[in-house]
Image (spheres, rainbow, N blue to C red):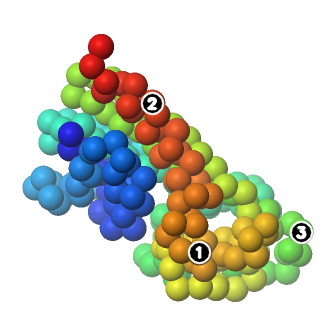
Amino acid sequence: MKLVLASKNPGKLRELQEILGSLGVEVLLESQVGLDLEVEETGTTFEENAFLKADTVMKASGLPAIADDSGLVVDALNGAPGVYSARFGGKESDAARTALLLEKLEGVPAEKRTARFVSAIACRLPDGRTVTAKGSCEGVVADAPRGQGGFGYDPVFLVPSLGKTFAELSAEEKNQISHRGAALRAFAEKFREAVEPC
């Protein structure tokens, strides 16, 4: 079975392929099925935005579509950047958004820099069904970026129990503990049940 990822993010594609590969599904980017869509993320929750993206791509492609909406929720910033993580402060690049985040947390002590990554997954099937799942990972925002891996806010998201940021973890380590990994494992179970022949 083919699943179209409602995203242009190759980092998300890699994570989905690694975790969902065991289901025998082939995850494709929109561009691989001839689509180049810009879905306006008008939802107020991660779940709403994931559904909007998956539904739009499913209708345009005629194929099952999967979307992830995820972001960083920082307690000291009243939950910001949250659903606006990918467009925080109107910044265009991961580095610019990360710099803005660190600027807003300047002077905030380490114990008050608690945060979590949240991921909501939605898969829209052409028969009208929707399969959803959610995951999260607790951590803190580091004082400065560390590591070369990952994408987005990974270089400043520190997992205290490991003493490493997401950007310092291998792909396998990150998938084991990340918000998206948790959401995808929960999704894989639900998806397997949804598509198994009766």
Q: Give the Cα separation between the discs numbered 2 and 3.
A: 37 Å
Above or below 24: residue 160: below
Q: Position of residue 113 (x, y in %)?
A: 80, 68
Crowdedness of circle 3 by 10 Å Cα count: few (<14), some, many (20+)? few
Looking at the rendered image, the disc whose residue lies closer to the viewer, 2 or 3, is 2
Q: Give the Cα separation between the discs numbered 1 and 2.
A: 28 Å
Q: At 12% across and 53% down in the image, what residue appears?
A: 33
Q: Position of residue 103 (x, y in %)?
A: 70, 81
User: Which residue has dot 2 on it?
Assistant: 190
Above or below 68: residue 112: below
Q: Are marks 1 and 2 in contact (CB under 8 Å)?
A: no
Q: Are marks 3 and 1 in contact (CB under 8 Å)?
A: no
- Which quarter of the figure has residue 38? bottom left
Sequence-earlier tag: 2 or 3: 3
- Which quarter of the figure has residue 161? bottom right
User: Which residue has dot 1 on it?
Assistant: 169
Q: Is residue 124 visible?
A: yes
User: Which residue has dot 3 on it?
Assistant: 111
- Going by the numbered disc 3, the residue's amino acid type is Glu
- Going by the numbered disc 1, the residue's amino acid type is Leu
Of helix, strand and loop, which one carries label 3?
helix
Q: Are marks 2 and 3 in contact (CB under 8 Å)?
A: no
Sequence-earlier tag: 1 or 2: 1
